[in-house]
Amino acid sequence: MLRQIALVVLAGLLLAGCGSLAKKFVREPKKEKTTVRAPSEEYSVDPKVVYERHFVFAKVWMDEFKSAMDSDSRKRLKKSMEQAVYNLEILADYLPSDYEEEKKEIERYANQLRAIYKEVLKLKEANLPITRAKKKVDEIRRRFHNRFLPSKQPPELWERLVVE
């Protein structure tokens, strides 16, 4: 009998704890989410700043792609290649329509990076050195830098960039 009373008291203490039963077992109602809206006025975006930003992003992601070749992470390798290609493609989209040669050149760089990615996966699978692949990325980065450096672009390009 004493044992049963002790069990009931113990169970009561465990259930009650620090808060009341209602507080422990009743869910609080969900709070309404508030949405933050951007101002309706248009922001003026300097085309040169946008071009420079994606130019730098493309170079940085190419560097990351090269350094990811040393890691065992396929996810990091793929992500860095995809981001480099993405920024190259955005840069090509910003160029005016009469810059077809430059757009094709950027597309070649993107395709070369995709091919290097596939090559690196095969080399890693076979435990072969990847130094040639790294040199290829360096070469693409160097050619891209020399050809599309913002300070080397004609001043009239900044008025003609297609920035949305």
Image (spheres, helix red, strand yellow):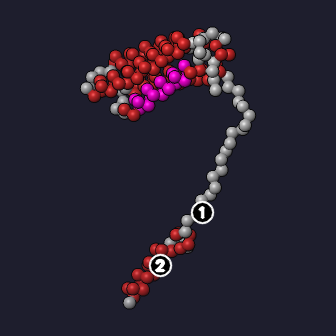
Residue 50 within the magenta-colored segment of the rendering: no
Is residue 49 something that shows in the picture?
A: no
Residue drawn at x 63%, y 21% is: 162
Of mark 1 and mark 2, the one earlier in the sequence is: 2
Residue 62 point in image, percent of width and height: 46, 22
User: Quadrant location of the N terminus?
Assistant: bottom left
Reply above or below: 71 against 159.
below
What whole-number distance in Å separates the C-alpha atoms at marks 1 and 2? Answer: 27 Å
Reply above or below: 20 against 134.
below
Reply above or below: 52 against 143.
below
Is residue 53 something that shows in the picture?
A: yes
Residue drawn at x 72%, y 37% is: 40
Amino acid of disc 1: Pro
| Secondary structure found at label 1 | loop
What label does residue 152 carry, if any?
Answer: none
Amino acid of disc 2: Gly
Number of callouts in the render? 2
Residue drawn at x 59%, y 20% is: 94
Q: Residues within 10 Å of mark 2 (few under 14, many from 20)?
A: few
The nearer-to-camera label among 1 and 2 is 1
Q: Is residue 162 left or right of residue 135?
A: right
Judged from this view, the residue extending furthest toward the right is 41
- On the image, which quarter does residue 54 sit in? top right
Residue 87 within the magenta-colored segment of the rendering: yes
Residue 72 point in image, percent of width and height: 34, 32
In the foreground, 21 or 95: 95
Residue 108 point in image, percent of width and height: 45, 16
Q: How crowded is mark 1: few (under 14 residues within 10 Å), some or many (20 or more)?
A: few
Residue 34 point in image, percent of width and height: 65, 50
What label does residue 12 carry, if any?
Answer: 2
Magenta span of residues: 76-92
Where is mark 1, residue-wise?
29
